[in-house]
Structures are given as structure tokens and as C-alpha cells.
């Protein structure tokens, strides 16, 4: 249950953040649910943490607090897999949640762009950014309800998942390699790539048969990317994938057993001969 926000707090604004409810309070800080207001009337729900006033002047606490904030900011990078603990102890579970651009059918990030840099391709529906037109205003990041766009502070341009558009149409690659890098890299085949408009594609079959769902459908964005409910699977790793071709173990002996009289891994890694 959300804690009350006192009238004094509700009237306060912390920069662009306006507290809505208190989520928790500890010895070091208080955590609030808040509305963040952006340009052109955009607004988003965020969570922020306020260091207790009596600790704010202590440099050691301040450094600790800032280190934690820096770490949290890195973990919340839109293009990484986020990890959550869900449920109540002792019945908790760990959920790994990959998040990237969902290439929405009706993407709110497109019409808000003042330069036309943010666009959806007619031919395949991929949502892209034309870097030559982007002025880094950030409107699209505010409009995206999934928080998957991030400004590149160095180039001052907006970035996000491109669905590896340069890979998937690359005729120099073998057909089985014309897939996004994340799909190819995933060791458990958790990601599937294909045409969501083709009812017989692998993705459409998986969505249909395994109860695939769109993220936050209430926004009306109609995401192309879907999520499948979690299930236990066996990891499919081929025997030869477990052996690195450059493994030093392959140099001196086919199989090395530490603790026997045969050469050890250290011996094999010592190339002195
Ligand atoms: S997920 Fe966000 S950035 Fe991607 S198309 Fe949808 S609204 Fe745009
Ligand atoms: S940051 Fe770039 S892509 Fe996003 S709205 Fe502004 S100009 Fe368009």
C-alpha cells in the first residue's frame, strides 16, 4: 500500500519531480512515487529517493548515496536486461526482463518529433531515427511509454534498438545470420525473430500457442514485440560449444585431470614447451 504524502511534501517539487505517494522510508532516505514533468506538457511516473536532511551534509553519506544513484542509473539503461525480485519472502522469484524498442504499430515517439528524424518504415514497420535530422530535443523519449530511448550525450542524438536493420537485410551474411545480434547471442533461445504479420512465422506461432502478450496495451501503442509467459526450459547447448578452439587444454592432452600424474591445466597453459 502506498504511504501518504503530507500536504507539505505534495506542495513541494523536487526540480521537475512532484511527489505523489511515499513508497518507503529508511534510516538513510525516503522513496517517493512522483510525476516528472517534461517539455511540451509530457509527464511520466518515476520513483525517486531523497537523502534524509540530517545526513545531507555528511560527505561520506553523500558519496555513498551518489554511488548508489550512479549504479542504479547504469542498471536502468534501457538496452540491458533488468532484473527484479518479485513476490513476498519466502516465495520470491527473480525475473530477468529484457527491454528494448518494441517497434510499435502506432508509435507515439514518431508524431512528436519536430524534425521528422523519428520515423516508422512503411515497408517493414521498423521504427528508426535519422541521425542527420535529430536535434536531440528528447521529445520522443518522453513520449515513449516504455522508456527505451536514450540520448547519446556525446553525439547529442537519440538512440535506441534498430532491430539490427543493417544485419537483417545484409545479403553478404548467410541467411541464418540475418537476425538481430541479441537473437543470435542468446544462449537459451529466449528471443525469437520473425514477421509478426505472417501468421505462420515462428513468432506468430509462438505468440498464438504460448500466450504471447503485448506490454502495457492500455497505451494503445500496439507493440510489434511481444513477451511470452515464463516457463522452465532446458538449455540447449551443443557439446562442441563447450570446448573453446583456443583452449590450452587442447594443446598437450585431450583431457586433463588435475590431481593426477597427467599434465595439469597449468602445464598446458605454459607454452615453454
Ligand atoms: S517502444 Fe517506444 S521508441 Fe519504440 S516504437 Fe514504441 S514508442 Fe517508439
Ligand atoms: S530527440 Fe531527435 S528523434 Fe527524438 S524527437 Fe527530438 S529530433 Fe526527433
Image: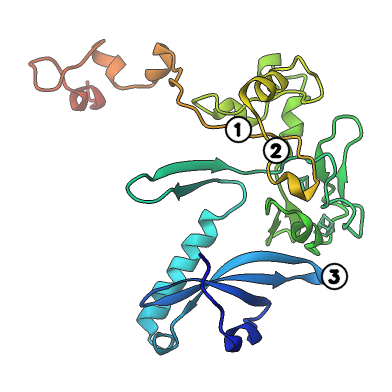
Residue 178, placed above or below residue 24:
above
Q: Quadrant of residue 153?
A: bottom right
Q: Position of residue 273 (x, y in %)?
A: 22, 20
Question: Could you give the CA–CA distance between mark 1 and mark 3, rounded to whole angstroms?
Answer: 34 Å
Look at discs 1 and 2 and give the one toward the viewer: 2
**Which residue is tagged 3?**
40
Q: Is mark 3 in CB contact (under 8 Å) with mark 2?
A: no
Relative to 260, 181 lies left or right: right
- Tell me which numbered mark, 3 or 2, is placed earlier along the sequence: 3
Q: Quadrant of residue 91?
A: top left
Question: Could you give the CA–CA distance between mark 3 and mark 2, rounded to whole angstroms?
Answer: 28 Å
**Which residue is tagged 1?**
182
- Tell me which numbered mark, 1 or 3, is placed earlier along the sequence: 3
Say few, some or many: other residues with alpha carbon within 10 Å of mark 1 (under 14 / 14 to 19 / 20 or more): some
Image point (38%, 19%), residue name: 242
Q: Residue furthest top?
A: 254
Image point (75%, 55%), residue name: 158
Q: Position of residue 144 (x, y in %)?
A: 75, 54
Amino acid at each position: 500500500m502506498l504511504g501518504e504524502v503530507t500536504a507539505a511534501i505534495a506542495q513541494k517539487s523536487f526540480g521537475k519531480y512532484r511527489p505523489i505517494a511515499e513508497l518507503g522510508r529508511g534510516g538513510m532516505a525516503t522513496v517517493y512515487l512522483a510525476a516528472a514533468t517534461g517539455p511540451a506538457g509530457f509527464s511520466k511516473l518515476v520513483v525517486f529517493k531523497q537523502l534524509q536532511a540530517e545526513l545531507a551534509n555528511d560527505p561520506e553519506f553523500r558519496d555513498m548515496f551518489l554511488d548508489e544513484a550512479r549504479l542504479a542509473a547504469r542498471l536502468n539503461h534501457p538496452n540491458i536486461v533488468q532484473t527484479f525480485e518479485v513476490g513476498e519472502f519466502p516465495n520470491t522469484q527473480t525475473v530477468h526482463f529484457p527491454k528494448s524498442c518494441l517497434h510499435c504499430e502506432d508509435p507515439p515517439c514518431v508524431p512528436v518529433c519536430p524534425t521528422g528524424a523519428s520515423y516508422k518504415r512503411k515497408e517493414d514497420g521498423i521504427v528508426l531515427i535519422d541521425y542527420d535530422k535529430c536535434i536531440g530535443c528528447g521529445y520522443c523519449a518522453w513520449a515513449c511509454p516504455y522508456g527505451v530511448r536514450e540520448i547519446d550525450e556525446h553525439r547529442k542524438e537519440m538512440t535506441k534498438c534498430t532491430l539490427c536493420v543493417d544485419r537483417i537485410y545484409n545479403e553478404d551474411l548467410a541467411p541464418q545470420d540475418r537476425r538481430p545480434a541479441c537473437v543470435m547471442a542468446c544462449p537459451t533461445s529466449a528471443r525469437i525473430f520473425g514477421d509478426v504479420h505472417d501468421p505462420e512465422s515462428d513468432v506468430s506461432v509462438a505468440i498464438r500457442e504460448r500466450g504471447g502478450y503485448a506490454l502495457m496495451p492500455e497505451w494503445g501503442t500496439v507493440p510489434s514485440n511481444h513477451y511470452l509467459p515464463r516457463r522452465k526450459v532446458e538449455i540447449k547447448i551443443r557439446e562442441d560449444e563447450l570446448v573453446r578452439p583456443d583452449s590450452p587444454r587442447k594443446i598437450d592432452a585431450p583431457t586433463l585431470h588435475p590431481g593426477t600424474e597427467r599434465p595439469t591445466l597449468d602445464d598446458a597453459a605454459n607454452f615453454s614447451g
